Image: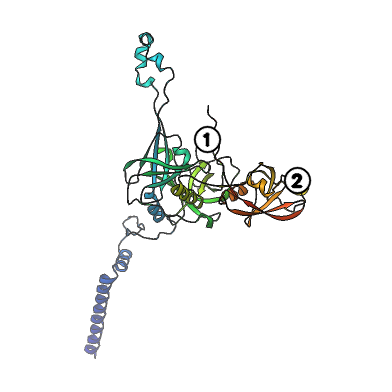
């Protein structure tokens, strides 16, 4: 009886040990972390600090990271270096006079005493694989030489294809093929609060990415450009960022960084970018015609105020008051008068003079457009044959 009981007890023990060894083998082969954790708990404490280590394997979609958008857009953003030759010295004939040089010869030959070329820095965005680059007009406007520094380290000379000072945009070209061109997004679909990234070369430190949100849309009356429809963002834009890319979280172009509001010269969280949709329109016209053609009707207008709206017995301050009509202009020929209030153009409502100017500029010259106006408390439509906006007259010194 006792022997039988001992045999059974030994058999149970042997089976238990075998099962435990089998379990340990399975854990070691397929679940080593579990076994290591059990052993660590059983091991005596030695005072070592146990830390959690992130996995070293790369992740393609990291929550809160914009690395994929940056990898997509950054190769298409370039640095632009411009230089302007110093003007000829009007007194050079005196400097070359032997009698004059007898007294000041050493100083005249001093390189530090001679005028040096003016250099400036900006950014640009590659918009085609054939070497077309969008940037700000003020980056290249007065340049005698333009050099583009690519993201891969190459430096290539560039030439101006066309400019549009009214929107502060310029198109330049480098002789290169198969370039990493940016992908355009529709800036018309942006919303306040959307996350955006600004890419450029601030202060010449090198290609830099900053992050922020869209603070406002349709900003105008800033006195920066003739035609203003800016995207406002708090993504840091500093000197050298001009002409760089404002992209969405997918790495697609939504704007061209253009200007900042600043009291110190650095970013204060108020930056402005030209919408990608407008930049695309300007670029396409420059490529097709070499310049930008805009609609024009020949009026002077002013914003409506609550006092003006009340005097004209209007319920809102929307619209633009026609303050003057140029004689012989399309507006004059169509019968538009001073005192009329423009309410819409081709069915698109006018909020103020800024939106009115943009809507008229978008019209095609030599085609008719319908303007809705208020005159003497009556609503009416006026059909205008759109003219071509005259080029600004630049006074010569």
Q: Which mark is residue 307?
A: 2
- Residues 333 and 326: in front is 333
Residue 218 percent across, percent down from the top left: 58, 50
Few, some or many residues within 10 Å of mark 2 (<14, 14–19, 20+)? few
- Residues 209 and 93: in front is 93
Residue 3 percent across, percent down from the top left: 21, 88
- The answer to whether 312 appears left or right of 64 in the picture is right
Residue at the image position 37 percent from the left and 53 percent from the top: 71
Residue at the image position 37 percent from the left and 16 percent from the top: 108
Q: Along the polypeptide, which appears first: circle 1 or circle 2?
A: 1
Q: Is residue 110 above or below residue 349?
A: above
Task: Say which quarter of the image contains residue 299.
Answer: top right
Q: Is residue 277 above or below residue 20?
A: above
Residue at the image position 73 percent from the left and 46 percent from the top: 339
Question: Is residue 46 in view?
Answer: yes
Q: Is residue 90 above or below residue 226?
A: above
Residue at the image position 59 percent from the left and 42 percent from the top: 222
């Amino acid at each position: 009886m006792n022997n039988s009981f001992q045999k059974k007890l030994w058999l149970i023990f042997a089976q238990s040990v075998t099962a435990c060894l089998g379990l340990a083998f399975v854990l070691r082969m397929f679940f080593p972390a579990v076994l290591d954790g059990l052993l660590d708990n059983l091991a005596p404490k030695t005072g070592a600090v146990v830390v959690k280590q992130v996995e070293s394997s790369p992740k393609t979609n990291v929550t809160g990271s914009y690395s994929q958008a940056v990898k997509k857009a950054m190769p298409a953003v370039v640095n632009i270096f411009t230089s302007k030759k110093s003007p000829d010295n009007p007194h050079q004939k005196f400097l070359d006079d032997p009698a004059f040089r007898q007294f000041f010869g050493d100083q005249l030959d001093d390189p530090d005493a001679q005028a040096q070329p003016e250099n400036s820095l900006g950014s640009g965005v590659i918009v085609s694989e054939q070497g077309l680059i969008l940037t700000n007009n003020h980056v290249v406007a007065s340049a005698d030489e333009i050099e583009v520094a690519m993201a891969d380290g190459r430096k290539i000379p560039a030439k101006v294809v066309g400019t549009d000072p009214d929107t502060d945009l310029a198109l330049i070209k480098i002789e290169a093929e198969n370039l990493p061109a940016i992908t355009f997004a529709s800036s018309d679909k942006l919303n306040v609060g959307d996350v955006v990234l600004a890419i450029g070369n601030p202060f010449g430190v090198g290609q830099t990415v900053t992050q922020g949100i869209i603070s406002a849309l349709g900003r105008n009356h800033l006195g920066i450009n003739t035609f203003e429809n800016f995207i406002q963002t708090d993504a840091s834009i500093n000197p050298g960022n001009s002409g760089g890319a404002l992209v969405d979280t997918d790495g697609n172009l939504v704007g061209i960084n253009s200007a900042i509001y600043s009291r110190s010269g650095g970013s204060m969280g108020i930056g402005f970018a030209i919408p990608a949709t407008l930049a695309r329109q300007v670029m396409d016209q420059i490529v097709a015609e070499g310049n930008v053609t805009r609609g024009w009707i020949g009026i002077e207008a002013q914003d409506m105020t609550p006092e003006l709206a009340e005097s004209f017995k209007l319920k809102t301050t929307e619209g633009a008051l026609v303050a003057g009509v140029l004689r012989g202009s399309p507006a004059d020929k169509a019968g538009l008068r001073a005192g009329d209030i423009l309410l819409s153009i081709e069915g698109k409502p006018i909020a103020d003079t800024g939106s009115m100017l943009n809507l008229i500029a978008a019209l095609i010259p030599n085609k008719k457009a319908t303007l809705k106006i208020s005159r003497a408390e009556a609503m009416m439509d006026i059909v205008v044959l759109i003219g071509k906006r005259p080029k600004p007259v630049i006074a010569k010194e």
